[in-house]
Structure formats: structure tokens, C-alpha cells
Amino acid sequence: MSALATYRIGALILSRFDSSRLPGKALKRLNDKPLIQWPIDTLKKMAGVIPIITTTDRTVDDPIQHFADTQDINCFRGNTYDIAKRIIDCCQEYQLDYFLRINGDSPFVNQNLIHDAVKLLKNQEYDFITNLIERTYPYGLSCELIKVKTFKENYPKYSEDQKEHITNFYYKNLKEFNFTALAKLDKDFSDIDWAVDTPEDLERLNAYLKKTNIKDIGNAELSILINDYEKIMRT
């Protein structure tokens, strides 16, 4: 039996509308669709993974809720600054066993990377699976799969900073967890930036998408995608 059949796994897409460097970036257009639509479209193709936009309960984030409603996408709203509490409440509402932490400003979420993480649960019930212990993947291409029960049990130990940056507690206390790291890439590509934090980031990725011939970014082999990006953007 596959891990997706054994566990209920949610992909929690963390998003807020009032970015200081790029206000309203969740709905800014990247190529032909809103930024937040990119990870959603990739995740919706993955059978057994439940995409859930996870935003705050402030009125400023109402446009994200409206977008989710019009697109028939799950949306959970909760605590603004205690993101860990928001996630715990979301996992409880959707009765999740594991969750993937997905940043809404990271459009190039990769199906193959997520499948690699989920497959590891077939033989062992890990607390934490990640590709970030030693960075080799492009910035904005993270994969963190977290056991909900362990996350809830450790929540009382989180500092205020760790409640906002929800996996920092794991990296600082790795020996306390049953964790594993995804395979590193053959080379260090962490200098490549695929996250959208600024207008310049949006402009750069738009420029790439206008030139690439790769049709399905989220399902592309990483080596092919990285080579294609470097060829287009560094020539």
C-alpha cells in the first residue's frame, strides 16, 4: 500500500496579501496566471495530496479567500503571526496525518521532489523529511514533509520566532526527531533564486517563462529544468 493511501497528506500553501516588498504578490501575474496558482496547479495533479491555501483571518487577506472560492480551492484562515498555531488548527480541521510546507511565493513546486519525500513514508513513519539540511537545490525549491502529531507535541517548546518560522525548531534539534534528508543534487544550485519576494524576482521569472519550451514546470525533471534555466538566463 502506498504512503498516500496510508496517510492523509495536506499541502499547506502559506500566503498573505500584504508583502512589504511586493504588496498583493499572491495574485500578481506570473506569465499567464496568478503567482499562487502555480503551486496549486502542480499540487492538484498529485492524487492523494490535498492542496490548502493557509492564510490569516485579517481582512487584508480577503482577496486570497475570494480567489480560493472562485477557483474551488480549500482555504483555511487562522492566526496571523503564530503560523505554527494556524497550521495545527488547519491540520486538525482537515484531519491530516502529514503536511507539506509550501510557500505561496515559490511557483516552481516540483511533483517529483514531493513524490520522493512521500515514498519514504512507505517503509518508515518519519517525523520530518527535508531537502534543506544541506542546501543544493535552487532557492524557492524546498520540500519539507512533517508529521502532524510530532509538530503538535513540540509546539509548546517553540520560541516566538519558531512559531513564525515553523521548521526552525526541527533544524536546531534534529537529534530529537526521526528524520531523513532527501538526496542532494550533484552540484550546488542554491545560488539560483526561484522565489518571488520582489518586483525584480517577478520580472526575472516572467522573462524565463517567456523563453522556455518546458510546458509543465511542476512536473519537469529537475536536472532538465535547472539546465534550461541556466542556459536561458545566464547567456
Image: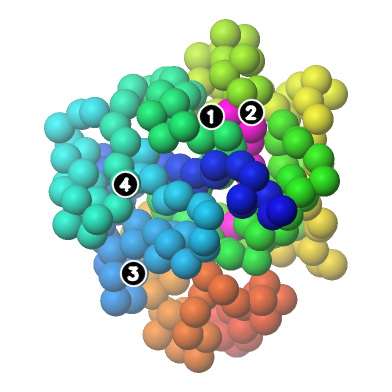
Question: Mark 2 or mark 4: which comes first in sequence?
Answer: 4
* Mark in front: 1 vs 4: 4
Task: Point out the frontmost of discs 2 and 4.
Answer: 4
Marks 1 and 2 close (CB-CB < 8 Å) = yes
Amino acid type indicated by mark 4: Asn
Instruction: Name the residue carrying label 3.
Output: 30
Q: Residue furthest top?
A: 156
* Marks 3,1: beta carbons within 8 A: no
Total numbered circles: 4
Counting other residues with Cα less than 10 Å from the Cα at mark 4, is it few (<14), some (14-19), or many (20 or more)? some
Which SS class for mark 4?
A: strand
For the residue marked with disc 2, what is the amino acid? Asn
CA gap, disc 3 to disc 2? 29 Å
Q: Is residue 120 visible?
A: yes
Q: Which residues are magenta?
A: 141-148
Q: Position of residue 96 (x, y in %)?
A: 51, 35
Quadrant where the image shows the C terminus: bottom right
The tag earlier along the polypeptide, 3 or 1, is 3
Q: Estimate how packed mark 3 is, as few (under 14), some (14 to 19) or many (20 or more) residues with alpha carbons within 10 Å.
A: many
Q: Which residue is mark 2?
A: 168
Residue at screen point 61% across, 51% down: 4
**In the rendered view, how is the structure colored?**
rainbow
> What amino acid type should be assigned to the residue bearing mark 1?
His
Q: State the residue position of label 4.
A: 74
- Residue 224 drawn above or below residue 60: below
Q: Quadrant of residue 125?
A: top right
Q: Nearest the camera: 149 or 40?
A: 149
